[in-house]
Image: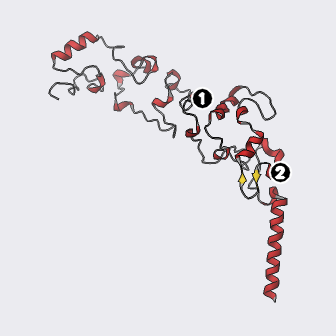
Amino acid sequence: MKSRAFLYIILANLAVITVLVFVYPHLMVAPGKLMKGHQGMEQDCFSCHSKFFGPQAGKCKDCHKVSDIGIVTTKGKPIQGPARKVAFHQELVEERCIECHADHRGVMKYRQGKQFSHALLKPETKNQCESCHDKPRDSLHEKLTAGCAQCHSQDKWKPATFEHDKYFVLDRDHNTTCATCHPKSDFTQYTCYGCHEHTPAKIRSEHLHEGIRNFENCVKCHRSADEHEGGEGKDND
């Protein structure tokens, strides 16, 4: 008899808790405070959540029209300045808000440890890095006009994939700016004639005299200031 009474008490408590979860969800199950822009909905959980299914992207778009993100606020006020950086939302192939965004983290707007997937962008937008990212202001990047993809991937910004010493050693004899060897900051091309007294005709004559016919790609043989380190281009190699 006592065990049955105890069971009834447990069931009654569970019933009360279940009712409270639906009546006062912001008090019973909310994992934290909402961000500032959402605090007006703190007691209206179902403005963002669907019963039994949690937050849904469709609920987000009821207030945040994808075509307006980064352009106008939810109140229709035009956005100026850096806030327009988020206008890349119009270029997404899928509108899956919950992939990147969450709430109940106070001042944290995005999921902790969650990175934006560039795979969500339309192919023609993926390489337009500067439309979302500010250009680094260090002494190297401020002189560059080439695309980010020559050194960086879309999975991780760091580390950069390019290792200059694998192609040419920037020793004390080659302590110069990038543009000296890479005109127009095109790092797929280079020239050695920006500094050296050589001319294409002179180089051709000297190399043919030594039996070297592959002399168009200088760094294939000369990867540092040592002009005698070469040899790969000779006919017998």
Q: Residues within 10 Å of mark 2 (few under 14, many from 20)?
A: few
Q: Earlier in the sequence, mark 2 or mark 1?
A: 2
In terms of depth relative to the viewer, which is nearer, 110 or 228?
110
Depth-wise, is mark 2 or mark 1 nearer the camera?
2
**Could you tell me if the residues under marks 2 and 1 are in contact, i.e. CB atoms within 8 Å?**
no
Measured along the vertical axis of the image, is residue 42 above or below residue 233? below
x and y percentages locating residue 230 in the rendered image: 22, 26
Measured along the vertical axis of the image, is residue 71 above or below residue 44? above
Residue 204 falls in image quadrant: top left
Q: Give the CA distance from mark 2 to mark 1.
A: 37 Å
Determine the residue positioned at 18% across, 24% down: 234
Q: Secondary structure at mark 2?
A: loop
Q: Secondary structure at mark 1?
A: loop
x and y percentages locating residue 17 in the rendered image: 81, 67
In terms of depth relative to the viewer, which is nearer, 34 or 143?
34
x and y percentages locating residue 111 in the rendered image: 65, 47
Residue 74 falls in image quadrant: top right
Determine the residue positioned at 72% across, 45% down: 58
Q: Quadrant of the image for the N terminus?
A: bottom right
Inspect the image, locate mark 1, and give the three-letter code of the amino acid beneath it: Asp
Q: Quadrant of the image for the C terminus?
A: top left
Measured along the vertical axis of the image, is residue 119 above or below residue 199? below
The residue under label 1 is 134
Inspect the image, locate mark 2, and give the three-letter code of the amino acid beneath it: Asp
Question: In the image, 14: left or right of 216?
Answer: right
In terms of depth relative to the viewer, which is nearer, 149 or 68?
68
x and y percentages locating residue 70 in the rendered image: 70, 31
In terms of depth relative to the viewer, which is nearer, 75 or 38?
75
Q: Which mark is residue 44?
A: 2
